[in-house]
């Protein structure tokens, strides 16, 4: 039976990448019934919002979605459409595997780090007070009244809530993922020496949860030290579990280690709903040029196939992608030694090459 999956082409370069990804997913032989949903800057006029309700309804119903990137239009009341989507569906775990594939210029051999980022709390909770507003003044007066340390009156304030509930479920997710994918170690990443009551809570909760998984090694690192070590010896790390902000920053660092945003996939996963999407954004300056790399979204498709328990199809697609990368012929500009290499191909040609590899393998 075909899988019914919500398919969101997105905007900017999203529709080109989504089309290329749809083709390779169908090329695996798995059957899909795509429930195509419009979201993003291009539908603002039609719906008055970049995130119309039918999109959310469709994902809630189908439980699985794959999406192209979405631009956050200025002045819509959304900090980010993507953050809003994750909040609406309580997609609390952001999974970003960063794996080295031979043939990518500048990538670090042996890197195979899976990032598990908490998606709902921390400085991304969206609780902020703008400098000079009555609310900011109220918050500052309240805090200054209860502590010796004084906040300057001309401050803006962002709140960083980290809860035991939120931390426990993300750390459990990381350990369960490690078990399922036969990973050996989970590293909790914080700045608990400075933020004792938020990051400290994250660390202590992680230490407690780790006791339930004696088969998997557990350690912790301070985020600054981790960044330095990742750049020097990425192969020492396996699964990283991080609060929201560090997760965001470290995933871009790891995307750099494996060759850039063009090959960095992702998934946002909740209790029984999952949305698969690349780490990168809508790269609006390349819109409609058949230029950018669809592999990050295709690798997100590999994650989706694994989520659907279509392991063989996932392997087929992943192997085909790895072969195309290794051959270095049918790759976009970002996977060439020089970005102005005239032999770089376009988005849709990458899909053709990947499909051909899958056909040859079967
Ligand atoms: P971006 O990731 O869209 O692009 C930054 C640069 O990275 C591009 O100019 C390009 O040089 C490179 N790049 C990105 N994707 C690439 C690909 N597939 N192949 C080759 N090169 C690629 O980041 P941005 O410019 O900061 O954001 C643009 C818009 O996207 C913003 O509105 C932002 O809110 C949104 N955004 C959306 C998502 C999402 O949908 N999940 C994620 C991040 C940003």
Image: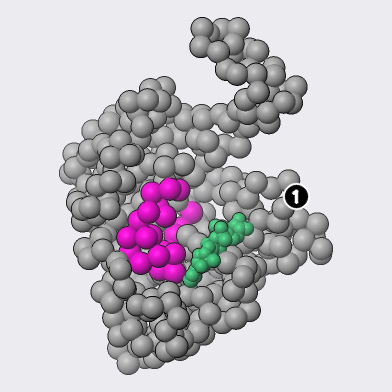
Closer-to-camera residue (328/150): 150
Closer-to-camera residue (158/177): 158
Give the residue drawn at x 40%, y 68%.
263
Can residue 112 be seen here? yes
Give the residue drawn at x 45%, y 48%.
248
Q: Does the magenta stretch include residue 168?
A: no
122 vs 112, left or right, is right
Q: Is the magenta stretch mostly helix, strand or loop?
A: helix
Please tell me whether residue 348 is drawn above or below residue 33 in the rendered image.
Answer: below
Please tell me whether residue 74 is drawn above or below residue 34 in the rendered image.
Answer: above
Q: Is residue 263 magenta?
A: yes
Please tell me whether residue 290 is drawn above or below residue 124 in the rendered image.
Answer: below
Q: Which quarter of the rendered picture does the C terminus lie within?
A: bottom left
The answer to whether the residue bearing label 1 lies less than 8 angstroms from the nearest atom of ligand 1 is no
Please tell me whether residue 2 is drawn above or below residue 211 in the rendered image.
Answer: below
x, y percentage for residue 251? Answer: 40, 53
74 vs 354, left or right, is right
176 vs 48, left or right, is left
241 vs 151, left or right, is left
In the rendered image, which residue does mark 1 sit on? 75
Q: Quadrant of residue 299?
A: bottom left
Q: Which quadrant of the render holds ligand 1? A: bottom right
How many other residues sit within 10 Å of disc 1, few (<14), some (14-19) or many (≥20)?
A: few
Give the residue drawn at x 68%, y 28%.
131
Can residue 89 be seen here? no
x, y percentage for residue 97? Answer: 35, 59
Q: What stretch is highlighted in magenta?
A: 248-268
x, y percentage for residue 40? Answer: 68, 62
Q: In which quarter of the image is residue 109?
A: bottom left
């Amino acid at each position: 039976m075909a899988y019914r999956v919500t398919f969101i082409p997105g905007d900017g370069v999203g529709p080109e990448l989504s089309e290329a990804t749809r083709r390779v997913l169908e090329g695996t032989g798995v059957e899909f019934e795509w429930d195509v949903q419009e979201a993003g800057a291009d539908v603002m006029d039609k719906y008055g919002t970049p995130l119309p309700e039918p999109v959310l309804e469709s994902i809630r119903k189908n439980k699985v979605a794959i999406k192209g990137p979405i631009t956050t239009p200025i002045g819509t009341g959304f900090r980010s459409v993507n953050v809003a989507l994750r909040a609406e569906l309580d997609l609390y775990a952001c999974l970003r595997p960063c794996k080295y594939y031979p043939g990518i210029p500048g990538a670090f051999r042996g890197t195979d780090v899976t990032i598990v980022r908490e998606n709902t709390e921390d400085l991304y909770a969206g609780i902020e007070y703008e400098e000079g507003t009555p609310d900011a003044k109220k918050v500052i007066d309240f805090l200054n009244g209860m502590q010796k340390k004084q906040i300057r009156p001309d401050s803006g304030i962002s709140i960083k809530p980290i809860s035991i509930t939120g931390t426990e479920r993300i750390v459990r997710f990381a350990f369960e993922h490690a078990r399922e994918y036969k990973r050996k170690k989970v590293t909790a990443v914080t700045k608990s020496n400075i933020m004792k009551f938020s990051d400290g809570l994250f660390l202590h909760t992680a230490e407690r949860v780790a006791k339930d998984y004696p088969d998997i090694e557990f350690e912790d690192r301070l985020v600054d030290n981790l960044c330095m070590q990742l750049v020097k010896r990425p192969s020492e790390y396996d699964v990283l579990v991080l609060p929201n902000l560090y997760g965001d920053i470290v995933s871009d660092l790891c995307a750099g280690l494996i060759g850039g945003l063009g090959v960095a996939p992702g998934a946002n996963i909740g209790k029984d709903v999952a949305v698969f999407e690349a780490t990168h954004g809508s790269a609006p300056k390349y819109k409609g040029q058949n230029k950018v790399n669809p592999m990050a979204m295709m690798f997100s498709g590999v994650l989706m196939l694994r989520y659907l328990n279509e392991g063989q199809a996932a392997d087929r697609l992943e192997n085909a992608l790895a072969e195309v990368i290794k051959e270095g012929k049918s790759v976009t500009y970002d996977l060439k030694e020089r970005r102005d290499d005239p032999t770089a191909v376009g988005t849709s040609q990458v899909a053709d090459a990947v499909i051909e590899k899958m056909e040859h393998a079967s």
